[in-house]
Amino acid sequence: MKKKINRYLILTVFLTLVATLIMAVAIFHHMYREQIVEDMKTYAQLISGMVTSGEELERQYTDPQPDLRVTVISTDGTVTYDSKAGSDQMSNHSDRPEIKKAEKSGEGYAVRHSDTLHRDMYYYAVQLENGDILRISKEEDSIWSVFRNTMYGIAGVALLMLLICLLFSRYITTSLVRPIEKLAQDIDSIDGLETYEELVPFITTIQKQHEDIIKGAKMRQEFTANVSHELKTPLTSISGYAELIETGIAGENEVQRFAREIHRNAKRLLTLINDIIRLSELDGGHTETPYTDVDLYDLAQTCVEMLQLNAENHGIHIACHGVRSIVHGNKDMIEELVFNLCDNAIRYNRVGGRVDVTVGMRGDQVMLSVKDTGIGIPPDSQERIFERFYRVDKSRSKLTGGTGLGLAIVKHIVAQHDARIELHSEVGKGTEMVVWFPV
């Protein structure tokens, strides 16, 4: 990343310098050219003010400026005087563009190749009083010689600027990348990290993702440890009872009891495995969840009927109240949610207790309430009951066959349906779980 940023910065600086240099040379050339023409014009006007004919100029003219060439052309185009070449060796100049312009308007200017000197020349011509044309010319090479002399200075300045920009680009690149490098070295200690305002959202996102990964890894580790522990208990019981039967230590009267315990633990183990699989599916988000309109009251009534026998076995009365209420969601998930809440209400209740399931509309929401007259939940445990494998009364949960995952599954289903769940509980008086579904 450093190299790439550095490379782009250097390339940008180099192209900028080249473009600036080309533009500066073009502007300088244009200005210098205009200045030369202006100097030639001034010089020509000065001479034309002193002489009136070519003969007079030939007698009086000395060559104070060797880089200028002075030529006089008569009205018929014959060269009568030239400061750089013999006039008898020169051809007729009546067809020269600067001569034509001077004859027509009194002055003329042109840049062209000289057949006499075999060089590119600047020409300025002015008409004298007697009709002859006075022409001043200068070699174009003299202009480029000035450029050659200044190019060394320009190139030196350009190299110096390039060197400064190289150092500056290295500094900028290091400054830009430094927060990211520090983030990579120690992502947990970036609270006091000084960085650019534009990088703050990026660093915040990275830190949040890192915290989520750490939290997720910790949760998975705890989950694995809890799963191992929960699976170990029934497996140990099954193995122990099976060993007693296998070795013949158990008598005939005990075999039936041991077999019943093996069956009970196997059933608990199967329930636990099913809950773990279900929770993993909900965690992964890979399950297909077709949403339809579901009559929550009808679904709750069905769950109550399914659990009626279980409630009677525990000496508990369960009933469903309410009116037809439609929610948009996954029927299987909502059924699982109602079943888990009702099953918990039965499991943690008292003999002779009640479970009341109520469904109805409250404003723009559908309410599902599962209320029991059970043991209740202490205030310090109410925030943790949705954690996996957390049990308020561990001995009671294991006795009744609870896995400790029911409310964790409920929490996932509630979140997936954009619903919310409320808990109202008092120790010794009972618990009410209220789920609010959006219409």
Image (cartoon, grey):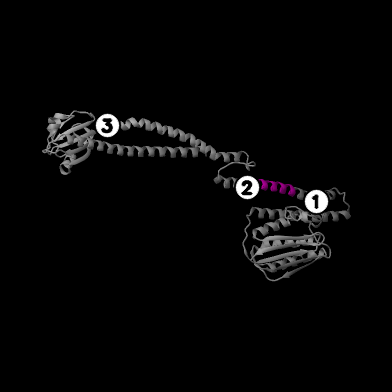
Q: Position of residue 259 (x, y in %)?
A: 83, 55
- Image check: 254 left or right of 358? right
- Residue closer to the observer: 171 or 382: 171
Query: Please, what is the three-letter code of the amino acid marked with disc 1?
Result: Ile
Q: Residue at x 71, y 66 (%)?
A: 300
Q: Quadrant of the C terminus?
A: bottom right
The 10 Å Cα crowd at callout 1, few under 14, some 14 to 19, many 20 or more, is: many
What residue span does the magenta drawing correspond to? 212-227
320 up-or-down from 130: above or below = below
Query: Please, what is the three-letter code of the amino acid marked with disc 3?
Result: Ser
Of the two numbered discs 3 and 1 on the same chain, state the one appearing first in sequence: 3
Residue, disc 1:
238
| Residue 415 showing in the rendered view | yes
Task: State which mark lies toward you, 2 or 1.
Answer: 2
Q: Which of the 4 quarters of the picture holds residue 30?
A: top left
Residue, disc 3:
142
Check residue 86 in the rendering and tell me which mark sits there, or answer none: none
Q: Residue at x 35, y 39 (%)?
A: 23
Residue, disc 2:
208
Of the two numbered discs 3 and 2 on the same chain, state the one appearing first in sequence: 3
